[in-house]
Image: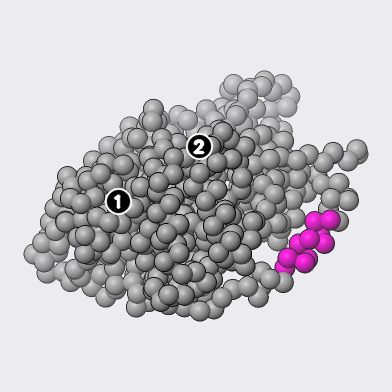
């Protein structure tokens, strides 16, 4: 067979590193099922093909369950039992076989028709728990379709060099991903702060996003190189390319293994300013990084991951156990649990009807206030876990004091109910995420009624600049160093300082050393980031004088454009701290019309 030609795809490297591996395609959930007519003589063969797919899918689920038990614990893994039961359900498989026979249809079509019929019945069920079971049916149908296609992605996921290729790695898919074996991620869509990017940095594997057409052009098993340092992915690399990369990855291996700074606790700048370094975590695969990289507790626990597989069916007690677990991981410094940030790009597909503008829709605190029972259950779980664990609550995406007041009323109310019921619980501090412009403008007011701020710079950039953080078409406009963003940060930090409350910067900005220095220059002294980024940010902050950073930050605040800020950072950082900031560690020069370029 003729060797396919090498093809290069340009994207955006969002998590550092180079990996040579094999493609493992992961479907994003959208199915393309075609109908074709089967001759009567071939119907029995088609039914046999379907039965074989059922067997294969069943084996896969059993294998996944075992892996999930290891990764997520028994509490979460039992959900796969429901999938096994569905695959063993004779009524369901019988209906699909009947559909094949009666309609003389291919098995894929029969699965789709019967699955959809069942799903529409489920969607009408009044009981919320049962209605949620619809997602299990979706999952099983999807697995059957994959099994019918002859591809076995989940089994392949055990290969040591799997590069996950997906159109868009949805959070719901993450729960099933074999994170221990995934070596790299490559997706058609996404940006620096998209979920895939955050996740990849969290588990410390390379990722390139925004590759447009990659998924369609790959097959599972294809050889692929993911090179985030050059913002590209090379499919079917030619022998010479492969050789060059093999040499390069071999020479890069060493600093990687010896590079982890094992220090912990706060870092001090040269002039003695202490900066707290906390960890952002979401999936259990990231937990070990908290201690390994010396984080002072968990500054942001993105709790919505808990709902990725089973939605709101995750009980109060299961949640409580999960919060206690993350508290154990965090130790003395404790955990800040963000109430479910659902909607927007997070688990939207499971929880909501499609919205025209999801980022501006029923997201985060709005979702919680509209679906009060979901929020109350989570609050109870946190309060109860807080009896023996150091936990705080942060409210995602509040717009102003009214969102905060409403949420606080619910939290107080649940505390009172627990008291009445004689149940033990702990008091928790309550903070607000500052991540939309209205919250920045009203920060003085919000600061008076909360215990702390968390600055979510990912969303702050998105909403301040009106740039979708996951849309690669507008990635050029996603400028973290835009003066408008810096002013928002400056204003929020000042509001916190005036009110005497702490402010933690927890967006991705904190995990980029040059940006972190600017944050210190703006007065931040508390950062939370992907655990694996802590050593490099620590190294940078330990080598700078915060007074220099302050002067530079002030100059940046008076800039007109992001280009202007970036060129100040490039020039001044390069001059003051050439060892810490060689050109490759500074923002790249862009080809835009700026007065300083
Ligand atoms: C942010 O918006 O910066 C943030 C920390 O939260 P997330 O990325 O989960 O929206
Ligand atoms: Mg956010």
Label drawn at residue 504: none
Q: Position of residue 194 (x, y in %)?
A: 50, 46
Q: Residue at x 21, y 64 (%)?
A: 500
Instruction: Single out the residue that lies furthest toward the left.
Output: 420
Given residues 67 and 578, the one toward you in this image is 578
Instruction: Single out the residue that lies furthest toward the right.
Output: 1
Asked whether residue 272 is in view, the answer is yes
Main secondary structure type of the part rendered in magenta: helix
Residue 300 falls left or right of residue 18 = left
Q: Quadrant of the N terminus?
A: top right
Nearer the camera: disc 2 or disc 1: 1
Residue 364 within the magenta-colored segment of the rendering = no
Q: State the image quarter where residue 377 is shown.
A: bottom left
Disc 2 residue crowd, few under 14, some 14–19, many 20+, Cα 10 Å: some
| Cα gap from disc 2 to disc 1, whole angstroms | 22 Å
Q: Earlier in the sequence, mark 2 or mark 1?
A: 2
Disc 1 residue crowd, few under 14, some 14–19, many 20+, Cα 10 Å: some
Q: Which residue is mark 1?
A: 491
Q: Which residue is mark 2?
A: 477
Secondary structure beneath dot 2 equals helix
Above or below, comparing residue 577 to residue 406 in the picture: below
Residue 99 falls left or right of residue 246 = left
Q: Position of residue 409 (x, y in %)?
A: 14, 53
Magenta-tinted stretch? 244-253
Q: Position of residue 200 (x, y in %)?
A: 56, 55
Residue 245 within the magenta-colored segment of the rendering = yes
Q: Residue at x 34, y 78 (%)?
A: 332
Secondary structure beneath dot 1 equals helix
Q: Residue at x 26, y 75 (%)?
A: 388
Q: Position of residue 326 (x, y in %)?
A: 39, 68
Residue 237 falls left or right of residue 406 = right
């Amino acid at each position: 067979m003729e060797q396919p030609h090498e093809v290069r795809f340009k994207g955006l490297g969002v998590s550092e590193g180079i990996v040579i591996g094999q493609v493992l395609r992961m479907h994003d959930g959208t199915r393309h099922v075609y109908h074709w007519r089967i001759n009567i003589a071939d119907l029995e063969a088609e039914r046999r093909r379907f039965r074989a797919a059922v067997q294969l899918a069943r084996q896969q689920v059993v294998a996944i369950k075992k892996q999930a038990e290891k990764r997520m614990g028994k509490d979460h893994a039992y959900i796969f039992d429901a999938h096994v039961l569905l695959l063993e359900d004779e009524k369901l498989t019988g209906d699909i076989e009947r559909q094949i026979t009666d309609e003389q249809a291919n098995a894929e079509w029969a699965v789709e028709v019967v699955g959809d019929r069942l799903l529409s019945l489920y969607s009408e069920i009044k009981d919320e728990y049962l209605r949620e079971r619809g997602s299990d049916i979706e999952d099983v149908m999807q697995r059957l379709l994959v099994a019918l296609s002859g591809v076995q992605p989940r089994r392949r996921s055990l290969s040591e060099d799997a590069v996950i290729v997906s159109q868009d790695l949805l959070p719901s898919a993450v729960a099933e991903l074999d994170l221990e074996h995934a070596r790299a991620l490559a997706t058609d869509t996404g940006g620096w702060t998209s979920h895939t990017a955050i996740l990849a940095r969290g588990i410390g594997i390379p990722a390139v996003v925004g590759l447009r057409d990659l998924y369609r052009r790959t097959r599972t098993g294809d050889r692929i190189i993911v090179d985030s340092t050059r913002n590209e992915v090379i499919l079917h690399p030619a022998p010479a390319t492969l050789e060059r990369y093999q040499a390069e990855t071999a020479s890069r291996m060493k600093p990687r293994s010896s590079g982890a700074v094992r220090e912990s606790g706060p870092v001090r700048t040269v002039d003695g300013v202490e900066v707290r370094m906390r960890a952002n975590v979401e999936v259990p695969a990231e937990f070990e990084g908290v201690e390994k990289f010396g984080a002072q507790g968990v500054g942001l626990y993105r709790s919505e991951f808990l709902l990725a597989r089973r939605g709101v069916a995750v009980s109060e007690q299961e949640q409580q156990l999960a919060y206690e677990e993350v508290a154990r991981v965090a130790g003395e410094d404790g955990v800040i649990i963000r109430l479910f940030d659902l909607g927007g790009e997070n688990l939207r597909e499971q929880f909501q009807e499609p919205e025209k503008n999801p980022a501006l829709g029923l997201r985060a605190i709005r979702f919680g206030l509209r679906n009060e029972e979901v929020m109350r259950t989570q609050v109870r779980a946190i309060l109860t876990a807080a009896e023996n664990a150091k936990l705080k609550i942060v409210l995602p995406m509040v717009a102003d004091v009214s969102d905060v007041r409403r949420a606080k009323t619910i939290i107080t109310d649940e505390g009172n109910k627990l008291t009445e019921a004689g149940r033990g619980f702990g008091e928790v501090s309550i903070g607000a995420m500052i991540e939309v412009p209205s919250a920045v403008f009203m920060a003085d007011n919000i600061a008076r009624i909360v215990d702390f701020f968390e600055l979510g710079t990912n969303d702050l950039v998105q909403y301040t600049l009106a740039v979708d953080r996951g849309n690669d078409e507008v990635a050029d406009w996603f400028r973290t160093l835009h003066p408008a963003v810096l002013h928002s940060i400056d204003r929020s930090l000042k509001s916190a300082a005036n009110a005497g409350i702490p402010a933690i910067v927890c967006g991705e900005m904190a995990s980029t050393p040059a940006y972190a220095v600017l944050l210190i220059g703006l007065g931040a002294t508390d950062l939370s980031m992907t655990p694996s980024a802590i050593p490099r940010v620590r190294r940078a902050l330990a080598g700078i004088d915060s007074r220099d950073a302050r002067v530079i930050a002030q100059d940046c605040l008076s800039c007109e454009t992001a280009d202007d800020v970036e060129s100040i950072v490039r020039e001044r950082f390069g001059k003051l701290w050439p060892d810490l900031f060689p050109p490759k560690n500074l923002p790249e020069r862009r080809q835009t019309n700026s007065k300083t370029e």
